[in-house]
Image (cartoon, grey):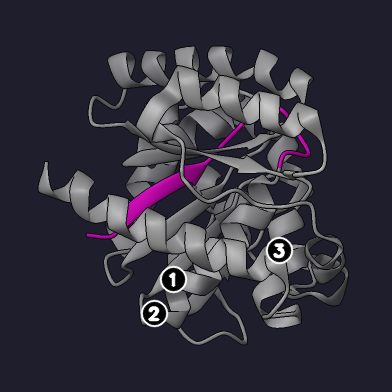
C-alpha cells in the first residue's frame, strides 16, 4: 500500500500547493510512483501542473461522492511517475452532498484503498479550512505535512490545526501522525522570519524540517507556466530548497515506517 501524506493548513496562501507539487515532482524524480490528489476547490495544484480544469473531465469531487472510480479520474502529467487527480469547483458543495451519507469521513480513504495500491506515495493538497473534505484527507492520511508561512499571523492558526489533527486521530484515524512543519516564504533579510522560525522550532522541536523554503520569484512564476518550479527553473534557490526538503521527507519516512 502507498504512504499517504496530507499537506494541510487552515490558513490559505502558506505554500500548501507549491509544497505538494514540488515534493511530488522531486519524489517522482527519484523513481517513486506518485499520485497527487487535488482536494482544493480552487484547483491550484491542477493549474500548477498545466491541467485544464474546464470541461467534463472527472475530478476528485466525483471520486469523493462516488460517481466515478479513482482510476477514471487520474491524469498523467509530463513528468514520469507523476499522476494527478484534478480538482473541481464542485468540491465546495461536497460537504452538503455528503452530510447524510454513511461513513462520510471515510469516502476518500475507501476510494484510495480500492485502487491506489500501485503508487508509492499519495500527496493530498487540502483546502484551507477544516471542512468535511479536509477531514476526508486527514482520515485517509498516514501523516500530515504542515507548511507554515514565516509571518506572525500564520502562527495563530497552527495550534488550532494541531488540535484538529489530534481530534481526527482520536475519533477516526489512530495512526495519523504529524510528519513535520515546513517553514515557507522565508526571507533571511527579515527579522520577523527569524523570530517566527525561532518560535516554531522552540514549540515543535525536531518536527520542524531543517530546510526552509525561501521567498523566491521563480516559485511564484512557475504556476503561470503550468509547471512545478523544479521544471521551470531547476537551479533557482526555491527548486534547490524543495529538493532538500524532499530528501528530509523521505528520510523521515524511513524513520516513521521503522517505528
Q: In the image, what residue occupies the spot 61% across and 47% down?
A: 39
Q: Which residue is mark 2?
A: 30
Q: Give how far across and how far down residue 48 sits, in percent.
A: 75, 66
Q: Is residue 81 left or right of residue 31?
A: right
Q: Helix, strand, or loop for circle 3?
A: helix
Query: What residue appears at the point 43 percent right and 44 percent down from the top-left corner?
Result: 108
Q: Element under label 1? A: helix
Residue named by callout 1: 27
The magenta stretch spans which residues? 1-14
- At horizontal 77% and vertical 19% (from top left) the residue drawn is 153
Could you tell me which quadrant the C terminus lies in? top left
Q: Are marks 2 and 1 in contact (CB under 8 Å)?
A: yes
Q: Position of residue 166 (x, y in %)?
A: 38, 16
Q: Earlier in the sequence, mark 3 or mark 1?
A: 1
Taking the spot 51% from the left edge, 21% from the top edge, the residue there is 100
Residue 46's label in the rendered image is 3
Out of 158 and 109, give the one closest to the viewer. 158
How far is the residue under mark 3 from the one under mark 1?
Answer: 18 Å
**SS majority, magenta:** loop
Amino acid at each position: 500500500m502507498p504512504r499517504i501524506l496530507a499537506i494541510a493548513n487552515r490558513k490559505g496562501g502558506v505554500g500548501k500547493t507549491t509544497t505538494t507539487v514540488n515534493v511530488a515532482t522531486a519524489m517522482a524524480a527519484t523513481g517513486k510512483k506518485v499520485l497527487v490528489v487535488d482536494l482544493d476547490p480552487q484547483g491550484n495544484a491542477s493549474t500548477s501542473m498545466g491541467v485544464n480544469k474546464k470541461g467534463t473531465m472527472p475530478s476528485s469531487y466525483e471520486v469523493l461522492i462516488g460517481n466515478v472510480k479513482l482510476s477514471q479520474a487520474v491524469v498523467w502529467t509530463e513528468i514520469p511517475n507523476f499522476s494527478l487527480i484534478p480538482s473541481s469547483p464542485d468540491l465546495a458543495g461536497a460537504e452538503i452532498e455528503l452530510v447524510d451519507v454513511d461513513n462520510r469521513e471515510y469516502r476518500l480513504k475507501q476510494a484510495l484503498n480500492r485502487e491506489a495500491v500501485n503508487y508509492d506515495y499519495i500527496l493530498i493538497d487540502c483546502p484551507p479550512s477544516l471542512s468535511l473534505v479536509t477531514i476526508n484527507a486527514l482520515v485517509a492520511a498516514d501523516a500530515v505535512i504542515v507548511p507554515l508561512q514565516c509571518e506572525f499571523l500564520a502562527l495563530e492558526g497552527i495550534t488550532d490545526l494541531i488540535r484538529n489533527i489530534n481530534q481526527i486521530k482520536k475519533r477516526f484515524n489512530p495512526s495519523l501522525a504529524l510528519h513535520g512543519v515546513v517553514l515557507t516564504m522565508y526571507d533571511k533579510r527579515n527579522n520577523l522570519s527569524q523570530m517566527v522560525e525561532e518560535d516554531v522550532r522552540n514549540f515543535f522541536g525536531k518536527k520542524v524540517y531543517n530546510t526552509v523554503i525561501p521567498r523566491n520569484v521563480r516559485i511564484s512564476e512557475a504556476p503561470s507556466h503550468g509547471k512545478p518550479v523544479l521544471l521551470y527553473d531547476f537551479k533557482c534557490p526555491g527548486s534547490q530548497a524543495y529538493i532538500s526538503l524532499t530528501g528530509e521527507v523521505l528520510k523521515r519516512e524511513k524513520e516513521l515506517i521503522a517505528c
